[in-house]
Image (cartoon, grey):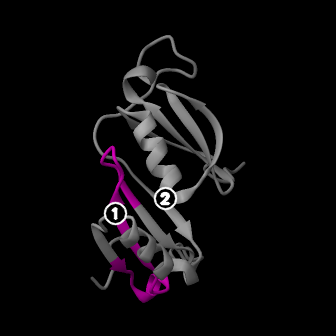
Amino acid sequence: MKINKIIETVIYCDNVEEMFDFYQDVFHFEVIQKSFPRGVFLRCGESVLAIFNRSMTSQEGQLPPHHGTKGAQHFAFEIPDNEYEEWKKLFAEKNIPIEKEITWSSRNNGARSFYFRDPAGNNVEIAEKKLWNPEGFTFLSSTN
């Protein structure tokens, strides 16, 4: 038995409409379902990004079972290696500050990634596809 992949990532916020507007403006994800103020489901490649109102999904008696979190979360979007500079340019054009940029070690194919904050304060990473190479990932092995 094995798990094939993660199919859904859930992030939490206080203002679903603000988060929806941000993610649509930057990434133009396909909308699967909108249900303001509770949440939205967006298609991200073969996966789903769900954005939930933390106060509504943390209540008992909900379907699925109640869940939620406080504070910043982290997740990463994979991009084609040859689009990295285009993504940085887009973020500059949209005045979205890049918090940190990393060039990972040769163990990770010298992949590049950068981090930014979404409106809810989540730490989001844009990473070249080659970051997660077949030999594995060397945590915190970067050149910056």
Is 113 rendered above or below residue 97? below
Taking the image as shown, residue 29 lies to the left or right of residue 74, namely right
Residue at coordinates 30% horizontally, 48% vertically from top-left? 121
Identify which residue, 12 or 8, lies in the foreground: 12
Instruction: Give how far across and how far down residue 93 sits, in percent.
Output: 39, 70
Query: What residue type is disc 1 on?
Result: Ile
Task: Give, as a single range, the part of the protein colored magenta.
Answer: 102-124
Is 62 rendered above or below residue 21? above
Q: Which residue is mark 1?
A: 96
Residue at coordinates 33% horizontally, 80% vertically from top-left? 142
Taking the image as shown, residue 69 lies to the left or right of residue 136, namely left
* Residue 137 shows in the view: no
Check contact, mark 2 vs mark 1: CB within 8 A: yes
Taking the image as shown, residue 112 lies to the left or right of residue 9, namely left
Taking the image as shown, residue 7 lies to the left or right of residue 130, namely right
- Please identify the residue farthest to the right as the structure is shown: 1
